[in-house]
Image (cartoon, helix red, strand yellow):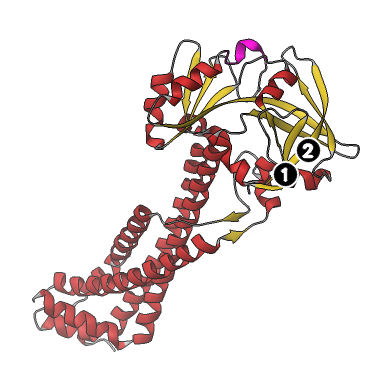
């Protein structure tokens, strides 16, 4: 029997019970739409976190002294970069480099009469391109100037937590290069907001020269942060700037934990994907099995008229593939619409929730984004699993004996 005739029979069979057919297609569409939305949500959160980490913390490439450990934020001279200006000048001669700027990091304690909070003190060159997000995020007061003295920037979130206003004087203590505490009184020059609550509530900025004098670091820096025009050039730039005593790290190196966390989390989501696909496949298989029991006499007649078992089996597989394909098309449309909507509107989780993941830069509003590769892979997986699940009802129908089938009630 020609494929066209099998398709006509399969199409007519699907139209016999339109309500069941439509509901089955809806189940496929909703299942795939949920998977596409989950994929878009995961992609948006993970890629967004990585972008924010690069934008605010790591840059695309960092140059550090071989012995420097970011976790300790050491201020020992042996752990700091001695001639940062030369390295900055060398980096800026490279066409792939957009900006290179030295930074100095130190652990500190910010205090008022009522409140105390542990912070990361960051000495910066205020006009550096890497700090553009801070300049753009100013919500009160004024941004730092390179020659400012006795002034700091804190976030609006930290200011609200500690009840600090612009112009207020606060106490800031750090450990100097000898491990001894240094304390000073500073004026809050301005408040910034980046949208990353965990970052905002623990970061304090001051001019690099002031940070160097305050911590006793001399003219040294913790790192040179480099931003590139194209992130794909990070490995080449790092290799070119690597030198004795200096370690060059790419954004992939510095965000290895975040990337590993994303891969670990994906294992859980793959399990969820599998469960949803299997549930939809079971629905399709159940639909076809019910159709087989309803059409036993018809199958017996077709077999008696000469239809071969493989043709009967192919007829039911065509039905399942048709249900799957139509459902998949509508699932792609529905899932894409949901992803597009949430990519624009987002899902607000609140700053308090986003601040819980202090080591992962998550915004208070999470956005989805399209992951075309996942969309295609999920659609193909849905189709394949549904067809495989339909093999049993199709095989069951093909194995029916014509004589018994004809005498079935």
Q: Position of residue 395 (x, y in %)?
A: 24, 68
Query: In front: 21, or 244?
Result: 244
In the picture provided, is 409 more to the left or to the right than 315? right
* Magenta stretch holds residue 140: no
Is 345 drawn above or below residue 326 in the view shown? above
Mark 2 and mark 1: Cα distance apart in space? 8 Å
* Quarter of the rendering occupied by the C terminus: bottom left
Based on the displayed image, in which of its 4 quarters is residue 187 positioned?
Answer: top right
Q: Pointers 2 and 1 in contact (CB under 8 A)?
A: yes
- Asked whether residue 128 appears in the rendered view, the answer is yes
Label drawn at residue 188: 2
Residue 191 shows which numbered tag?
1
Q: Residue furthest right?
A: 113
Q: Which residues are magenta?
A: 76-82
Residue depicted at 39% across the width and 20% down the height: 240
Q: Relative to residue 36, is residue 72 drawn left or right? A: right
């Amino acid at each position: 029997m020609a494929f066209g005739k099998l398709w006509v029979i399969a199409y007519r069979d699907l139209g016999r019970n339109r309500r069941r057919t439509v509901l089955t297609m809806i189940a496929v569409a909703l299942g795939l739409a949920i998977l596409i939305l989950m994929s878009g949500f995961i992609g948006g959160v993970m890629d967004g976190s990585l972008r924010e980490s690069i934008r605010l913390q790591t840059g695309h490439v960092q140059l550090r002294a071989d012995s420097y450990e970011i976790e300790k934020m050491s201020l020992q001279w042996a752990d700091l970069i001695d001639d940062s200006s030369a390295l900055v000048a060398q980096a800026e001669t490279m066409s792939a480099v957009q900006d290179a700027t030295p930074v100095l990091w130190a652990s500190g304690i910010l205090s008022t009469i009522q409140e105390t909070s542990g912070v990361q003190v960051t000495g910066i060159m205020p006009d550096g391109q890497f700090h553009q997000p801070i300049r753009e995020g100013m919500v009160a007061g004024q941004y730092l100037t390179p020659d400012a003295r006795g002034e700091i920037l804190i976030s609006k979130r930290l200011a609200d937590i500690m009840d600090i206003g612009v112009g207020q004087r606060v106490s800031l203590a750090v450990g100097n290069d000898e491990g001894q505490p240094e304390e000073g009184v500073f004026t809050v020059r301005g408040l910034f907001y980046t949208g990353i609550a965990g970052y905002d509530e623990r970061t304090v900025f001051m001019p690099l020269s002031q940070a160097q004098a305050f911590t006793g670091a001399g003219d040294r820096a913790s790192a040179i942060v480099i931003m590139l025009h194209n992130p794909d050039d990070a490995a080449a730039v790092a290799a070119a700037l690597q030198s004795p005593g200096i370690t060059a790290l790419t954004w992939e190196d510095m965000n290895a934990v975040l990337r590993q966390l994303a891969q670990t989390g994906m294992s859980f989501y793959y399990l969820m994907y599998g469960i949803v696909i299997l549930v939809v496949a079971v629905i399709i298989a159940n639909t076809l099995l019910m159709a087989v029991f309803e059409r036993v006499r018809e199958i017996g007649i077709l077999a008696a008229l000469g239809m071969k078992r493989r043709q009967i089996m192919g007829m039911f597989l065509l039905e399942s593939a048709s249900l799957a394909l139509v459902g998949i098309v509508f699932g792609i449309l529905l899932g894409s619409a949901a992803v597009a909507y949430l990519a624009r509107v987002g899902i607000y989780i609140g700053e308090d929730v986003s601040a819980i993941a202090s080591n992962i830069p998550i915004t208070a509003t999470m956005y989805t984004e399209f992951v075309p590769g996942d969309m295609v892979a999920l659609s193909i997986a849905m189709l394949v699993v549904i067809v495989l699940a339909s093999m049993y009802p199709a095989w069951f129908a093909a194995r029916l004996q014509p004589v018994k089938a004809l005498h079935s009630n």
